Image: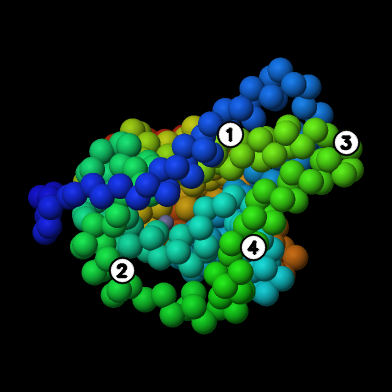
Amino acid sequence: MEEVQTKPREYFIVYPMVLIMTYWHIGAMYGLYLLCFNSVKWATLLLNFLLYVATCWGIGAGTHRLFCHRAYKANYPLQVLLMLFHTFGCQSTVINWARDHRLHHKYTDTDADPYNSKRGFFYSHIGWLLVKKHPELIEKGKTIDLSDLYENPVLSFQKKYYVALSLLLAFILPSLIPVIFWQEALINSYHLSLARIVIGSHFVFSINSVAHIFGNKPYDKDISPTTNVTLSVLTFGEGYHNYHHVFPFDYRTSEFGNNYLNFSTKFIDFCAWIGWAYDLKHVSDDIIEKRAKKTGDGSDLWGRVQTKTKG
Ligand SMILES: [Zn+2]
Ligand SMILES: [Zn+2]
């Protein structure tokens, strides 16, 4: 595919973001140091692990699959829960996240793609957050339909109170709960929260960088997104990125819906079972198989074979 570049790619650094990110990373590394050498209580570690699980569901099952791609529908209690889970991760508002991601799908690997992988690994991973947006991205950003997101009262509420909400849910409560309930040192709980947020963010960033560079392309060999099983484990099922770019409306974001690596799919299935999620969209095995044969790179992943032999 020929690369279309309408305007020069200039790098105007956004210094406040560079400062915030530098502080976050130093704080996160200090958190890991404390974890190893400052006798962090196991309950604090467990709390942060559970918050990480919730963040994966909030961003994967919520922001990505529900709010951005509308791959299924959810009642208000589930929407509120997923919005709160998303906020634990401190990755901007659901509306901003979904806007960037819709642009990413519509204009993949062009200058209107916020995390354009044609600009290299670092840019698509985290660099895009540290510089001003490309003019093409600003222009195309105005044309993308976000009415469903702005009309959603849960998401509007989050956007309106985002600063207070994210400070409370991502930092203040995870820092104070261990201090109040099991006498953890504040220095431990605070820096461990930072480590959780930074590590979780890097896993999500890796979908835009690693999963657009390394891995197989079983469904479309002519696009940059790949399948990366390691990332799928770490992000609860978001690493089947080649499949996802081919069938973005599939609520499983992967062809193997009952796979144990895809915890976000399990979560959505559970929510459907209790009646909180409904109208789950997915692609039939037959269509998946045909598409793989037609445009795939021939890599026969175990998941697809497993699905076939099972059926
Ligand atoms: Zn992508
Ligand atoms: Zn997507």
Badge 2 marks a residue whose secondary structure is helix
Inter-mark Cα distance, 1 to 4:
21 Å
Q: Nearer the viewer, mark 2 or mark 3?
A: 3
Inter-mark Cα distance, 2 to 1:
33 Å
x and y percent of residue 184 in the render?
83, 34
Q: Nearer the viewer, mark 2 or mark 4?
A: 4
Inter-mark Cα distance, 1 to 3:
21 Å
CB-based contact (under 8 Å), mark 2 and mark 1: no
Badge 4 marks a residue whose secondary structure is helix
x and y percent of residue 139 in the render?
24, 69
Q: Which residue is mark 2?
A: 141
Inter-mark Cα distance, 2 to 4:
26 Å
Residue 168: quarter of image: bottom right
Crowding at dot 2, Cα within 10 Å, few <14 / some 14-19 / many 20+, comes out as some
Q: Which residue is mark 4?
A: 164
First in sequence, mark 2 or 4: give its number. 2
Left or right position of 128 against 67: left
First in sequence, mark 4 or 3: give its number. 4
What residue appears at the point 75 percent right and 51 percent down from the top-left corner?
173
Q: Amino acid at mark 1?
A: Gly
What residue appears at the point 23 percent right and 43 percent down from the top-left corner?
119
Q: Which residue is mark 3?
A: 183
